[in-house]
């Protein structure tokens, strides 16, 4: 099972996306209220990334892209950090029940 937590961007609720989601019974979508970035864990991730990049100087967009990608790869490996992003907005991450 997959749970998507989405903001109300128009691309998330268009006809094509709705058809894609409804065709997959293993996907559940939870929409955040409009204009509620404080409820979106991704906003916490972006704030973290901004702090990492704040004092850096980049000579090109390619350099910036490399640093961002490298840092995001590190973040993906830090489950404690990812859990913190989720918990920072008041959500409680929990594992799905076993299907056995």
Image: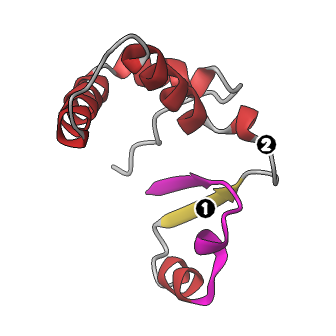
Q: Nearer the viewer, residue 15 or 61?
A: 61
Q: Residue at x 43, y 57 (%)?
A: 1
Choose top left, top right, bottom left or bottom right for residue 68. Answer: top left
7 relative to 56, above or below: below
Q: Residue at x 45, y 56 (%)?
A: 2
Q: Residue at x 74, y 51 (%)?
A: 32
Q: How many marks?
A: 2
Q: Which numbered disc flags the more N-terminal residue, 2 or 1?
A: 1
Q: Residue at x 35, y 21 (%)?
A: 79
Residue 70's spot in the image, x, y percent?
Answer: 19, 29
Q: How many other residues sit within 10 Å of disc 2, few (<14), some (14-19) or many (≥20)?
A: few
Start and end of the magenta stretch? 1-15
Q: Is residue 54 magenta?
A: no
9 relative to 59, above or below: below
Residue projecting furthest to the front? 59
Residue 47's spot in the image, x, y percent?
Answer: 54, 24
**Marks 2 and 1, how far apart at CA:** 16 Å
Left or right side of 44 for 76 = left
> Which is closer to the viewer, label 2 or label 1?
2
60 relative to 13, above or below: above
Q: How many other residues sit within 10 Å of disc 1, few (<14), some (14-19) or many (≥20)?
A: few
Left or right side of 52 for 59 = left
Q: Nearer the viewer, residue 6 or 22?
A: 6
Choose top left, top right, bottom left or bottom right for residue 98. Answer: top left
Residue 37's spot in the image, x, y percent?
Answer: 72, 39
Q: Is residue 4 magenta?
A: yes
Residue 36's spot in the image, x, y percent?
Answer: 79, 42
Query: What is the secondary structure assignment of the residue under circle 1?
Result: strand
- What residue does disc 2 label? 36
Query: What is the secondary structure assignment of the residue under circle 2?
Result: loop
- What residue does disc 1 label? 29
């Amino acid at each position: 099972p997959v749970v998507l937590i989405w903001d109300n961007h128009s691309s998330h609720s268009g006809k094509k996306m709705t058809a894609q989601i409804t065709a997959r019974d293993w996907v559940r979508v939870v929409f955040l209220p409009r204009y509620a970035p404080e409820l979106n864990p991704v906003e916490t991730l972006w704030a973290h990334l901004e702090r990492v990049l704040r004092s850096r100087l980049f000579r090109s967009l390619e350099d910036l892209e490399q640093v961002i990608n490298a840092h995001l790869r590190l973040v993906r490996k830090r489950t404690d950090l990812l859990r913190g992003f989720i918990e920072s907005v008041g959500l409680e991450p929990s594992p799905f029940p076993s299907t056995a």
